[in-house]
Amino acid sequence: MNRRVFFGTLAASMLMSAIPLTASAQSSDRSRVDVWIGTSSAKPSKGIYHCTLDTQNGKLSDSRLVAEIDGPGFLAMHPHKEVLYAVGALDRIPVVAAYKVVGRGAEASLELLNSIPIGDGGAAHVSVDSQGKMLLTAQYGSGSVAAFSLAPDGSIQKRTALMKHEGGSQIVPKRQDKPHAHWTGFSPDERFAFVPDLGLDKVMIYEVDLNQATLKAHGFGQAPLGGGPRHMKFHPNGKWIFVLNELELSVTVFDYDAENGTMTPKQTIPTVSKSNLAKEAFKSASEIRIHPNGEFVYSANRGHDTITVFAVDSQTGELSVVEIENVRGATPRNFNLDPSGNWLLAAGQDSHTLASFVVDPESGELAYNQSIIQVPSPICVLFGR
């Protein structure tokens, strides 16, 4: 049997076995996972939206507005408390805001705990360490990373550091004339923080003091010139880093030295071939995720409006393309895998949609679940804890 037909049949059988056979056999609340959706500032968006994913059949509930904030482009969850963080603007002031999560499922809502001005323009990304002591934001326009200390209740205490990037690789006109910090995150041992900078073609590395919530310059990882590093993820084994290059639509694999906090490039692979991108008026890579089992990497391609599935070599970490799947929407600015790794949700920024896909556990391939909902200008998908 053809491999794609086989896995397509397998995915279909998984879906059929998960769908209740009678109207009375409804999925329990325990099978429903909260999904928080960050949106752009473009109308008709009004802030943060919420829906649920039924993990038995991959179906999505209708979305609804749960917090009004202008352009909450990226969201993060506190590691231990029911607190959600968002970067956006309140009263036209760029802030990072903390919200208390109240209830679950259809009753879930957000209550503003507090917000603090970033002080260096609007942020494109936000992340929190695994102990809930420190929050980081990346400012694309001003090319900086900011650090904030967190209180025991999860509220934001104060800004503790602002690191300004300098220069520009000057390879791609108008995109690399100056720094553009685009993502923040921590190493597995949280001794270091990482900030891909699209304008520099570098991943900036900082030493971290969690107790003081401060940063110290440590060095950088060199991305391909003109690649435009946007987002990155660590492999679960902590030995490899996968960096998504927005401008070149490629992924660079790095070996990571945990003791010294250094990263060395070893492979760069296109997400879509240049011949398949030739007709696209707009093309840009947007997000990268790793399957919980560490065997597959996924990246999104705007313009081409697809998600590329890669297999991870278990010995080297190098990637090979498995398939390229249509997202059933326009401009996939973001997507995410649920904690089980069984479902992938793809957000179409320009189609105002969120679509559900089942993930084949053996091949990593995606199959459209025929569940799609309307969400105004979604650009971040975050699962509840």
Image (spheres, rainbow, N blue to C red):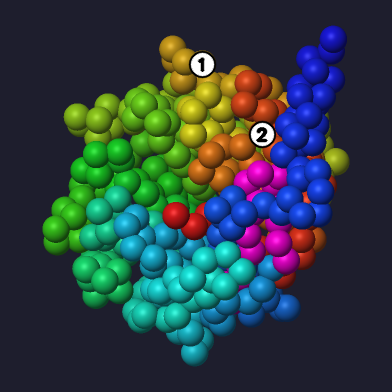
Circle 1 crowding by C-alpha within 10 Å: few under 14, some 14–19, many from 20: few
Residue 203 in view in this figure:
yes
Q: Which residues are magenta?
A: 47-62
What is the three-letter code of the residue carrying label 2? Answer: Val
- Give the percent coordinates (x, y) of residue 272: 71, 32
- Res. 277 image quadrant: top right
Q: Residue furthest bottom?
A: 91
Circle 2 crowding by C-alpha within 10 Å: few under 14, some 14–19, many from 20: many
- Give the percent coordinates (x, y) of residue 288: 55, 41
Residue 260 position (above or below residue 94): above
Residue marked by disc 2 = 359
- Give the percent coordinates (x, y) of residue 104: 52, 66
Residue 300 in view in this figure:
no
Q: What is the CA distance from the residue labelled 2 to the residue labelled 1?
A: 19 Å
Horizontally, residue 54 falls left or right of residue 228, namely: right
Q: Residue furthest top?
A: 1
Point 71% across, 44% down: residue: 57
Residue 208 position (above or below residue 18): below
Horizontally, residue 180 falls left or right of residue 305, namely: left
Horizontally, residue 313 falls left or right of residue 164, namely: right
**Number of the label disc, if any, that sits on residue 15:** none
Q: Is residue 59 magenta?
A: yes
**Number of the label disc, if any, that sits on residue 313:** 1
Q: Nearer the viewer, residue 265 or 368?
A: 368
Q: Is residue 333 magenta?
A: no
Point 71% across, 62% down: residue: 61
